[in-house]
Each structure stands twice: as structure tokens, then as C-alpha cells.
């Protein structure tokens, strides 16, 4: 991969660990829970974990942290695998599943019970909360804390056998109910859950908690640097406690970095799911979603997302990153790589009265102003063309660089024309413009020295094709849609999607393959829709607008 990973505190730790010999080979992992699609925040985590492994000659695992059967499914595992690959990363070996270690976790739970370090507790949820204490008050020992090892082993086996109802009992570690860190107040290791699991079916009726699973998963896989986000910092003592009290095969260490929170974006899976479930968007991969699949469908290049993740750095503070930085990376990539084409979104017909009826002149145009390697396209020119209705005015001052009655404009990659007359319908709306071409202006300025006002795009009426064009804007119209008291659904941008059913495209654009990216000149960057586009029925999604008003490239 061409991206050079920026130096950061994690790289410093790894360099020291390699230099001191604490670790021989760096092993990281990306551990999503398969309960939703991955989003831009996960892209950051992927880029950190895979990037550090790659930069240090190590390995990175993809591991599904699937300890929560009710909310998980193979729809999500499949989408996650596809997203990681699309971003340009390959995990080491097979995909791994926390669920494939369930027996090992259980054996280790038995070990803790045997050592007097875990017990079965019968407090219900409300009682347990009351015993737990608060940030300012210590907790109290559960009345079940001093059960004998034999009784605990028996109850745990019967929990596993499915003898008890959900919520009737839990297995807890015996640590310290007076610890200032609430995570250390006899945390839960196992809950009873009579739910089928997408990988293990109905084999288990108890499931481990995140805390009891994560560090042990890392240890089983030989992960050296277990990198997660800052909200797990307070869990690190517990992560270490389990490793200290279990006969684990290796000793991973946890490191935390700040979550990525782009402005104008929601990155909570729960909220993204709500947008999907309530039909606010068309699905997890709706082009307005900050999911990796959504950004892909929107036309964001994978390389630009990786570039953005590098650009913002990796630190130990949770800040909001301006979404404009992501947009900058997208534009920079597409400006460099997207082929140019012309598309008229709001067509107004222009009849060139001096140009022969039925004549089709094939003009050539570069696909990219400074990428000769992308070649040329054929551009048919005819007597009747469409221009954008916004590119014409009957009268305008000098600042208006488009077509005006009695003055000239250049048609992009074609002739200079001059507008002579407007035709109206009975309601008085302009339905057509009559104009004429200026002789010998293909690639030349007019011989009489009268310059065109500017350059506009166009499409031949008889040779052009129609396309559906989906215009996307930001999904939220508030910079922090879900911070503080904000109800994020109140900040949905009502104009986040508008569809142009019949835009006109130059014929070469209809040949696009799904996911091919373009700059529609003067309009922005667009992508042929991954699912709906075909040569017969072209469909394009707007990726993002141009940086400024158009600069002739
Ligand atoms: P949510 O809280 O929305 O459910 P999550 O963090 O629980 O998301 P996981 O599937 O557990 O989602 O995340 C997998 C990995 O991605 C974790 O290591 C997590 O720390 C990391 N991650 C999730 N969100 C972000 C983010 N916004 N920025 C950076 N890393 C993230
Ligand atoms: Mg999580």
C-alpha cells in the first residue's frame, strides 16, 4: 500500500517493544461485533490496526467479537469482511470468531471458580445495581459471595446446562466491591441467555461478557498490542486481572486511542440502526450513511478514506474532526483519478440554426485534463443540444460567465456559440434558445477577437442519453447531531436526497461500469451506482460537489 503511516504514540510503543525484545512479531487485531455495518470510525480502527501490523512486518487478525447472540447475524459478518477487503486490507489467515473459543472461556471460568476467584450470584438486576454502589460510594459484598467452590461449580454447570431462567443467576469474578473502579466490583463473567447464536446455534445457554472474553481472545491469538478506543481505559485493570489469574498462553497488552467523531456525522451503531429501521435512509449502505458500504456506494474511493485516516493522526484525545477534511481527501483523489464527462441536470434546448440538420460531427475530448493515460472519448456534436437552464440568461452583467442573449459562450470541448433568440410557450416559459456557431472555433478563439464569456457543458439531443441522477447532500444539517441534548433525528437534512429522473449524459458515460467514478464537468463528482446502474438504464450518484465554482481544467 502506498500510504505511509504517520508516526504516533502507538508506533512509538511498538518500536520500543521491538527494540527491547518484549515482542518479536507485532500482532494486532480488528475486533468488530457483528451487530451492524462498519462505519467511518471503524475505518479508523482498521487503518490503525492493519496499518501498524503492516508497517512493522507483523500480522493483523479479523476477529468477530460475537459474544452477544441476540443482536448479531451473518448478514453483518459478511458485510464486515467485504468492507475490510474493499478498504484494501487482508487479515492474517482465516477470519476468527470469539465464539469458537467459548469452550476455552468456560474452562477458564471453571478455573477461576476452583481458585476461589469467581462465584455464582443470585441477585437480580435491581439488587445487583444497589449492591454495586456508585462512583462516590463503595459497593457491598453480595450475600452469595462466600458460596463454596463445590456449590459454585455445581451451579455454574447447571447454568450451562440451561436449568435456570434468564436473569436468575450470573457468574461473577471475586475482586473488590470497594474498588474505586466500578469495573473491578465483582464484574459479571457469564449471563444466562436462551438465544440461538449465528455460529454456535443452541449449544450454549450462557454467554461471556465482553470483559471476560476480550483479553482472553487476544491471549489465545497471540495478540501483542490490543488497540481499542478510550472508553475501555477503565476496563484495562480488569483486562489485566483476568490475564493475571488465568493460565493464558500469551500476554497481550491493551492500548487506547481517541475515537474518531467527524462533524455532521453519527457514529453509533445503535443510532445508525435506528436510521435504517425507521426508514430514514434506504439501508445500511445508503449513500448518505457514514458506513463503509454507504461511502463506497456514494463513490468515496477506498484510498481517500485510508488517506483521511492517516491525515487525522492517532492520539489519546476524543475530539471532533471536521468532516470537511474527509471531503478534502475525497476531492483530492477524484480530481486526480476521475474521468471527465458532461451531464446536463436541468436541460434547456439550444438549436444552432446555422448547423446542418441531421449532421453528426464526432469531436474528440480528453478523459482527463492531465492524465493522457486515460485516453480520449468521442463526443458527438449536432444542431440541437441541451445546456443547463441555469447557464442561460436573457440579460446579465459581465460577471455572468455563461450564455446570454446577444453574447458568446464556449461549449466545452466544442464551438463558441452566440445566442440570438428565445422561444416561449403559451405560458411564457422559455422552451428553446436559437443560437449560431462561430466559424473555426474548435480549439481556437474567434477570429474577430470577440471573446466568449465563459465555458459551459452540453449534451447532444439526438446522440445523448438519459440517466437517473441521485443528488446527495449531508444527512445531518447540524454539526453535532447527537451531542448533548440533541435528538439526532431532529437534525436530518430534508434535502439530503433529490432525484433527477431525466438528466442528459454524453453517450460515452452510459458505458460506465458500476462503481466507475467521474467528474461531471462543472457539477461535481459522480459514481455509477453499484447496484442499479446499467448501460441500458444509467444511474449515477453524486459523490460530492466541486471545491469551488468550476475552474477550467
Ligand atoms: P458502537 O459503540 O457504535 O456499537 P463499537 O465500538 O461497539 O461501536 P465494535 O464493533 O465493538 O463497535 O468496534 C470494533 C472496533 O472498532 C473496536 O476496537 C472499537 O474501539 C473501534 N471503533 C468503534 N468506533 C470507533 C470510532 N468512532 N473511532 C475509532 N475506533 C472505533
Ligand atoms: Mg463495542
Image (tube, grey):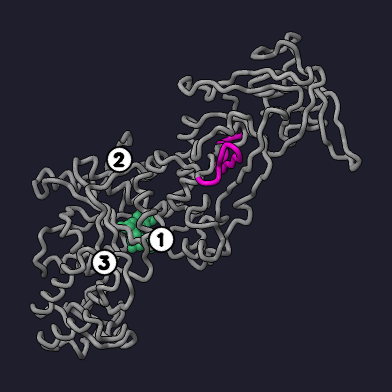
Comparing marks 1 and 3, which lies closer to the viewer?
1
User: As rendered, which of 348 and 468 lies closer to the eye?
Assistant: 468
Q: Is residue 533 on the magenta stretch?
A: yes
Q: Residue furthest top?
A: 447
Q: Is residue 470 above or below residue 454?
A: below
User: As rendered, which of 27 and 325 lies closer to the eye?
Assistant: 27
The reply to whether the C-beta atoms of the residues labelled 2 and 3 are less than 8 Å apart is no
Q: Is residue 371 above or below residue 290?
A: above
Q: Residues within 10 Å of mark 1 (few under 14, many from 20)?
A: many
SS for callout 3: helix
Going from N to C along the chain, the mark reached first, 2 or 1, is 2
- Residue for badge 1: 36
Residue 6 badge:
2
Left or right, 22 with respect to 288, comes to left
Residue name at image x 20 percent, y 84 percent: 158
Where is residue 429? Give x, y as percent.
Answer: 85, 40
SS for callout 1: loop
* Mark 2 to mark 3 CA distance (whole Å): 27 Å
Going from N to C along the chain, the mark reached first, 2 or 3, is 2
* Mark 2 to mark 1 CA distance (whole Å): 29 Å
Left or right, 217 with respect to 481, comes to left
* Mark 1 to mark 3 CA distance (whole Å): 25 Å
Residue 234 badge:
3
Going from N to C along the chain, the mark reached first, 1 or 3, is 1
Q: Which residues are magenta?
A: 531-550
Q: Is residue 216 on the magenta stretch?
A: no
Where is residue 355? Give x, y as percent.
Answer: 78, 18
Q: Which part of the image, by quadrant, shows the C terminus?
A: top right
Amino acid at each position: 500500500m502506498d500510504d505511509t503511516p504517520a508516526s504516533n504514540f502507538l508506533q512509538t510503543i511498538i518500536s520500543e517493544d521491538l527494540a527491547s525484545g518484549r515482542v518479536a512479531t507485532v500482532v494486532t487485531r480488528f475486533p468488530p461485533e457483528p451487530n451492524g455495518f462498519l462505519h467511518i470510525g471503524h475505518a479508523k480502527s482498521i487503518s490503525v490496526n492493519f496499518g501498524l501490523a503492516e508497517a512493522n512486518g507483523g500480522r493483523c487478525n479479523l476477529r468477530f467479537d460475537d459474544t452477544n447472540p441476540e443482536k448479531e447475524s451473518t448478514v453483518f459478518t459478511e458485510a464486515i469482511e467485504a468492507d475490510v477487503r474493499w478498504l484494501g486490507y487482508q487479515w492474517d489467515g482465516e477470519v476468527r470468531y470469539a465464539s469458537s473459543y467459548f469452550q476455552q472461556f468456560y474452562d477458564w471460568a471453571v478455573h477461576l471458580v476452583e481458585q476461589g476467584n469467581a462465584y455464582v450470584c443470585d441477585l437480580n438486576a435491581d439488587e445487583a445495581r444497589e449492591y454495586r454502589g456508585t462512583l462516590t460510594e463503595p459497593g457491598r459484598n453480595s450475600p452469595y459471595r462466600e458460596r463454596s467452590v463445590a456449590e459454585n461449580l455445581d451451579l455454574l454447570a447447571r447454568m450451562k446446562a440451561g436449568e435456570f431462567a434468564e436473569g436468575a443467576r450470573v457468574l461473577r469474578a471475586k475482586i473488590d466491591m470497594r474498588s474505586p473502579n466500578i469495573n473491578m466490583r465483582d464484574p459479571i463473567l457469564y449471563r444466562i441467555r436462551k438465544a440461538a447464536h449465528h455460529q454456535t446455534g443452541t449449544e450454549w445457554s450462557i454467554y461471556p461478557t465482553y470483559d471476560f472474553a476480550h483479553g482472553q481472545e487476544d491471549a489465545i491469538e497471540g495478540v501483542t498490542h490490543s488497540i481499542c478506543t478510550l472508553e475501555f481505559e477503565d476496563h484495562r485493570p480488569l483486562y489485566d486481572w483476568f490475564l493475571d489469574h488465568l493460565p493464558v498462553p500469551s500476554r497481550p497488552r491493551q492500548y487506547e486511542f481517541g475515537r474518531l467523531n467527524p462533524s455532521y456525522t453519527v457514529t453509533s451503531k445503535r443510532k445508525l440502526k435506528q436510521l435504517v429501521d425507521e426508514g430514514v435512509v434506504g439501508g445500511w449502505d445508503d449513500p448518505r450513511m457514514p458506513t463503509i458500504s454507504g461511502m463506497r456506494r456514494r463513490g468515496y474511493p477506498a484510498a481517500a478514506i485510508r488517506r483521511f485516516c492517516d491525515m487525522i493522526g492517532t492520539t489519546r484525545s476524543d475530539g471532533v474532526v471536521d468532516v470537511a477534511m474527509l471531503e478534502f481527501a475525497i476531492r483530492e483523489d477524484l480530481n486526480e483519478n476521475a474521468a471527465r464527462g458532461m451531464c446536463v441536470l436541468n436541460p434547456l434546448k439550444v438549436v444552432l440554426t446555422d448547423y446542418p440538420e441531421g449532421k453528426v460531427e464526432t469531436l474528440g475530448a480528453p478523459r482527463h485534463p492531465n492524465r493522457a493515460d486515460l485516453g480520449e472519448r468521442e463526443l458527438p456534436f449536432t444542431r440541437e443540444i441541451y445546456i443547463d437552464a441555469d447557464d442561460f440568461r436573457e440579460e446579465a452583467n459581465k460577471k455572468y460567465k455563461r450564455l446570454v442573449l446577444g453574447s458568446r459562450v464556449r461549449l466545452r470541448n466544442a464551438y463558441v456559440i452566440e445566442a440570438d433568440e428565445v422561444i416561449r410557450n403559451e405560458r411564457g416559459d422559455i422552451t428553446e434558445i436559437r443560437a449560431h456557431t462561430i466559424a473555426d472555433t474548435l480549439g481556437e478563439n474567434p477570429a474577430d477577437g470577440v471573446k466568449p464569456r465563459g465555458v459551459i457543458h452540453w449534451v447532444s439531443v439526438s446522440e445523448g442519453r438519459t440517466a437517473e441522477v441521485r443528488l446527495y447532500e449531508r444527512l445531518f444539517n447540524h454539526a453535532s447531531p447527537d451531542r448533548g441534548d440533541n435528538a439526532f433525528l431532529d437534525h436530518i437534512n430534508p434535502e439530503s436526497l433529490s432525484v433527477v429522473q431525466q438528466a442528459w449524459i454524453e453517450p460515452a458515460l452510459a458505458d460506465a461500469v458500476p462503481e466507475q467514478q467521474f467528474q461531471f464537468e462543472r457539477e461535481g463528482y459522480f459514481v455509477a451506482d453499484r447496484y442499479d446502474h446499467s448501460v441500458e438504464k444509467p444511474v449515477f450518484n453524486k459523490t460530492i460537489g466541486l471545491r469551488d465554482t468550476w475552474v477550467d481544467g
